[in-house]
Image (cartoon, rainbow, N blue to C red):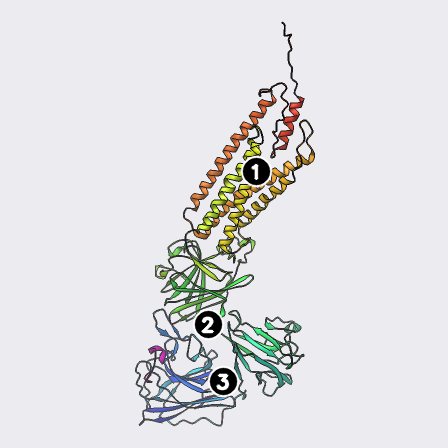
Amino acid sequence: MTVPRRPSRVRWTLDVDENSIDIGLEAATGTMNYMAFGWANPNSTSQFMLHADVAVAGFKEEGSPFVDDFYITKYSECMTNKDGLVQGVCPDTIYEGSDPVGLVNNTKLVYGHRKDGVSFIRYQRPLKPFDKKYDLQVNPMENMTVIWALGLIRPPDALRPYYLPQNHGGPRLEVYGNLMLNISEHVDDCLGPLDAEDKEDQDLIIADANVPLVVTTGPALHYPNPPNPLKVLYINKKEAPVLRVERGVPVKFSIQAGHDVALYVTSDPIGGNATLRNMTETIYAGGPEAEGVQASPMELEWFPDRNTPDQVYYQSLFEQKMGWRVQVVNGGLSDMYNNSVILDDQQVTFFWTLSKDSISIAARGEKKSGYLAIGFGSRMINSYAYVGWVDDRGVGRVDTYWIDGKDALSVHPTRENLTYVGCKSENGMITLEFTRPLRPSCNRGESGRQECNNIIDPTTPLKVIWAMGARWTNEHLSERNMHSAKSSRLVRVLLMRGSAEAEEDLRPVLAVHGFMMFIAWGILLPGGILAARYLKHIKGDGWYQIHVYLQYSGLAIVLLALLFAVAELRGFYVTSLHVKFGITAIILACLQPVNAFMRPKKLSNGEEVSSKRVLWEYVHGIVGRSAIIAGIAALFTGMKHLGDRYGGENVHGLIWALMVWFLMGALIALYLEFREKRRRRDRIFGRSNWVLGNHEEDDSLDLLSPTGTLSEKESQQSGRMEVQLEPLGR
């Protein structure tokens, strides 16, 4: 019997005595296509494919035929939900887990061949099957509804070790359909052989990571996509084969096609440099330099990644239509991503590949669930969440949210710019994938969108948490969507190092770093400045010695604390605000000893102060004050960085304590400044203890306020003193 509108046929031989029927499926279809035929459920009045018992037949990559017994429970590819329930178009053996004695798989391959683009497979099945659960009984005397379909078949991989039919697509009665059939009646409307439009089967080559593909040229004998040039590309001595590669597995080419043929992998099916035709294309590998000869082959290596489309093309850059298709299939996640870590409780594995401006992320649940969510933040509240789930139609989805509370109303959808999104359920375990920019592309008018703040800094540990639940929806969330399992603590993922660290208390070395910086910038260095300004009334150079000792001690502690932090973090990245303020303060502090070494010589008493000395005093004072300001800012930003990194509950209290400390220091400085001004005012108006004939120099040089010193000396010189002299013998 010929199927309507399609060059495909079904033949059968009935043997009631042996309780069997031999069925032959014949179709002019591709070598990687399947042929499905079977009986619908007798109780079905519509949607005849649902709960149907069908046989799926086809040819493997090496050309051998196969046939498997399938049972359809859902209009989707075969998958397993969180409870371990198998749904979709699945082999009977998957439903039962194994079939050691053939009680579930009731189909038996008899014969198969493929010639001139036509597939033919003959198999046998029982009329009354042993399997009552997944196979239907065929009554040879009744009119029964049969279904059929043609389409692409997915080859086995590490996750699905079966040949699984994909959605047939296409219009009804051309690639799928149903009809009434009584197998006891004699029907013969098959006239002549089937004639396929493409009689030449396309060769298939599967790339191996360890074996290079030899690329040469040869005559176009059976090119699959005419019109074509006289010379086309050969791979491993096969004319323009279909090349199958695996994401994450390197593909090696040994190009020996001549200097006039440059190999490249492109998104354009024609090749020959699409830009010359005013068209755009994406080049994945190769280019003008990818040419060589047999005596001196060119070695080209290509790394298909998770962002590579399912179908690309290998072509010549200099001439059109010399190559053909490349099928890109999924490999293992560990092959497709550069880094991976296990999150808290070892329930979720986190994968990522870092690029210049984007990051590709995958997460795989290690136990069954209805959805998998990962969040960026210290906890679910105030975190950015990515939820992977499979809807009722079997379509995988990844939705993004901002969470600011514990109830369903606090889960707010966002519109993040995700690309290469994917989600699937394997044996009830969810795997989600997506690519996102490191910095969201938000316009000026969109700064209020919450997702605009979701910035990933590769140099800063990324805080990752996870949750799983039974059911998710993108419409109205409720308590039914609450998670049933979640991480007990966050994990900090070090994106650039490819490792992770669990949440822990503050590292002792970093605590010492912070304490030493507080001693330096909060006590010693400000104390040295106060000594230089307010202790000059002490006789001798005591104020100067105190100033020097405090400044050098503070600078030494700063440098030592910096070395501690760099050694503990195993790197030095000038990205965070804390590091920027700290480096600025350290540079300014290190300039002060150099500045002191260049200090102009102090003049004798009564000499006019030189302009160089005045300029030096200004520079010395400004640099010192700037260093203190930057150092204090580094202390506060360091406390904030401590809270962001370790989620410290006492950080706010420490910040307030630091503010109180510097406020007290400011009040003390104001009090000392008030006393100093009053002391100078008393000296100017003659109320100081002045002794006639005391010409000792008053070294009241103020390094931080040169104008004050100058005006004081001038006022002393311009002051008029009167002394009344009387005779001694009076």
Mark 2 vs 3, N-terminal side: 3
Residue 94 in the magenta stretch? The answer is yes
Real-space CA distance between mark 1 and mark 3, rounded to the nearest whole angstrom: 86 Å
Q: Nearer the viewer, residue 554 or 366?
A: 554
As helix, strand or loop, the secondary structure at mark 2 comes to loop
For the residues carrying marks 1 and 3, which lies nearer the camera in this image? Answer: 1
Residue named by callout 2:
332
Kind of residue at disc 1? Val
User: Label 3 near label 1: C-beta < 8 Å?
Assistant: no
Asked whether the viewer can see residue 424, the reply is: yes
Tell me how far mark 1 sits from mark 2, CA to CA: 63 Å
* Quadrant in which the N terminus is drawn: bottom left
SS for callout 1: helix
Residue 573: quarter of image: bottom right
Residue at (50% x, 51% y) in the render: 565
Residues shaded magenta: 93-104
Mark 1 / mark 2, whichever is N-terminal: 2
User: Does residue 449 show up?
Assistant: no
Picture coordinates of residue 90, whole percent (x, y): 38, 78
Q: Look at the numbered discs 2 and 3 and tell me whether their residues touch, using CB distance below 8 Å.
A: no
Q: Position of residue 241 (x, y in %)?
A: 55, 82
Q: Residue 135 location in percent, x, y?
A: 33, 83
Q: Nearer the viewer, residue 711 or 222?
A: 711
Residue bearing the label numbered 1: 548
* Mark 3: amino acid: Thr
| Image quarter of residue 187 | bottom left
Instruction: Give the labeled residue for mark 3.
Output: 31
Q: Image quadrant for the C terminus? A: top right
Element at label 3: loop
